[in-house]
Image (cartoon, helix red, strand yellow):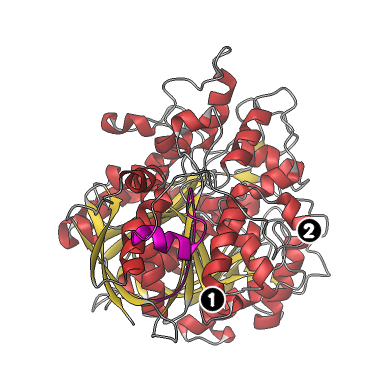
Amino acid sequence: MRPLLLKKFTATSCIGRGLEQTLDSLVGQRSGLKRCAFETVDLDTHVGEVPGIDTAALPAYLQRFDCRNNRLAEIGLRQDGFDQAVHEAARRWGSKRIGVFIGTSTAGILETELAYRKRDPQSGALPANFDYGATHNSFSVADFLRRRLRLEGPAAVVSCACASSAKVFGSARRMLEADLIDAAVVGGVDSLCLTTLYGFHSLQLCAAAPCRPFDAARDGISIGEAAAFALLERVPGTLSSDEVLLLGVGESNDAYHMSAPHPEGLGARLAMQAALDSAGLEPGAIDYINLHGTGTPSNDRSESQAVTSIFGPTTPCSSTKGATGHTLGAAGALEAVISALALQHALMPGGVPTAHVDPTLAAHYIREMRRAPLARVLSNSFGFGGTNCSLIFGRAG
Amino acid sequence: MKIAAYVGGIGVLGPGLGNWPDASAVLSAQRRYESVPTVLPMPTLLSAAERRRTGRVMKLALAVAVEATTHAAVAPARLASVFSSSGADGHNCHEICQALATEGREISPTRFTNSVHNAAAGYWSIATGAQCASTVLCAFDASFCAGLLEALTQVAVDEEPLLLIAYDTEYPEPLHAKRPIPDAFAAAMVLTPRPQSGSLARIEASLGSEPADLLTDLELERLRASIPAARCLPLLKRLALREQGRSVLEYLDESNIIVQVDPCI
């Protein structure tokens, strides 16, 4: 593929609003996971909750979109001047030439969960002010962002469970190469809700303590929430050396099981290899891997096998989900932004709070942050249904 | 770059439309349209255990996927795929929301696994062994056009054969009152970068602001307007008539998709 420029990017999660706080937490190896006190949830688990969502407000003309997910999107796009960068791009390219491709798994379904508690006792009807299209429907977040940023180009939500917001980079890449657009707002927004908390609990996949990816005693995930965005454009003639490029995208399917990964990580391997092929790179060109690393016994085992089958046992890798929680449909974009920060600031995030790396996992998992110049980083995102996506980012120079 | 592809097999299932030959006869006015509730077949390509776990949305998507690939000259396992739907499994979603509003809040693992928007795509890849790239989109009422654009750009840019599936089913009450999709409708197309034996037509898409095509038959127009996936009907009509020309499909607020159709035979 032709490389693309991450003209602007930003992330908001439980480890920080915007890049400065996020970087600070990564360098300080801090986790944002706390004992779950979300809504009325009574589960013994930790979550990565973004503080202050309840008091955030949407612009008046977009009130019908008001829900936790779109409030998180609004908070996210106000960080690091992201909305301003999009306005500048719209002035340059025209609002019809900018696409919006956003990943989410549950969008604003929390609104529906709450509305079901307020059904009319006689008729069973949902409250009159409940707006399905602007909150519950998966597209609501892309619809909101498109109106908020006053864009008129193609738009879609990708909803492929936990690979959603990695795959949006692929959609944008194809639209840019086909010359349908000149820039794309890509990203992921997913917020806490009862469906995912009680759902992962029903599968016995939620850890009680903060998740410990690749730990010998790992016992499940911690759910988080995030809004992360990037503005993608074609690469201009001149670039400063610390700008970040999207170099490769690889997508695959396990074709194996709805909720369990392929035991040898076959689909994951196909996605990583496809990303290397699309970037025209050999495995040795990758300096650090930001793992999917959810912290369930089977996911980490299968990912470790997939990673070592391509990269061998020496390429440093870590999961940042012990810091941010698993932000599900936003994880791909959040970890794309973390990969971009790693490249710009020459660091490999430590895989906290893992204490004892599982000796049966051959991948080179790093628990402590390392400072080292990085040229290229690979980021993995895998989801239910066996859907996989790997992204490769690199420094411009 | 031309955003174009060749249409191989087609699959259709909806109210009063049993398959593509049947829909083709209706759309080319050889048979009068009569709206009767959609009948969903058992997905025979799934194992008995998986079949028990599938809801209406999976049965619907798999039915048109099977029909389209049966008539195309490409093995399903070699096809990339784009799934597009406004709302995934509405009945399953209702059951989950209902359970979460009770004291116990217990939902079954299968309900949760099936709640992901990409559940139908997951079952399809498991059933066919397709490990190629696959994505699952939602664009509310614009879901068919979003899927079409994604599919055509992928075929054009990556030069891969691909299966496009657009599908929607109804919600039960009380969500039905808020999202009144009346029944199940789906359409699937195999799209290839080059013509193949049996290719029906070359289609090329562009964005524009001219008004979308409506259907002259009032019942068919009601179907087009009430189920997001059925917004493909003006394109299917032109393909059924083997008629050269442009179909304008309803997309997002200020833009529609213009599809130039050139029949192959």
On residue A134, which mark appears? none
Taking the spot 55% from the left edge, 87% from the top edge, the residue there is A282
Q: Nearer the viewer, residue A129 or A373?
A: A129
- Dot 2: few (<14), some (14–19), or many (≥20) neighbours within 10 Å? few
Secondary element at tag 2: helix
Q: Nearer the viewer, residue A360 or A90?
A: A90
Taking the spot 38% from the left edge, 52% from the top edge, the residue there is B32
Taking the spot 41% from the left edge, 68% from the top edge, the residue there is B151
Q: Nearer the viewer, residue B63 or A223?
A: B63
- Dot 1: few (<14), some (14–19), or many (≥20) neighbours within 10 Å? many
Taking the spot 39% from the left edge, 46% from the top edge, the residue there is B223
Q: Which quadrant of the structure image shows residue B207?
A: bottom left
From the image, tell me which residue sits under label 2. B48
**Residue A286 at what x, y percent from top left?**
55, 79
**Residue B158 at what x, y percent from top left?**
42, 80
Dot 1: chain letter: B
Instruction: Left or right? Give the position of B117 relative to A83.
Output: right
Q: Nearer the viewer, mark 1 or mark 2?
A: 2
Observer able to see residue A336: no
From the image, tell me which residue sits under label 1. B79
Q: Nearer the viewer, residue A27 or B22?
A: B22
Split into 4 quadrants, where in the image is the N terminus of chain B? bottom left
- Check residue A268 for magenta coloring: no
- Give the extent of the magenta segment: B7-30
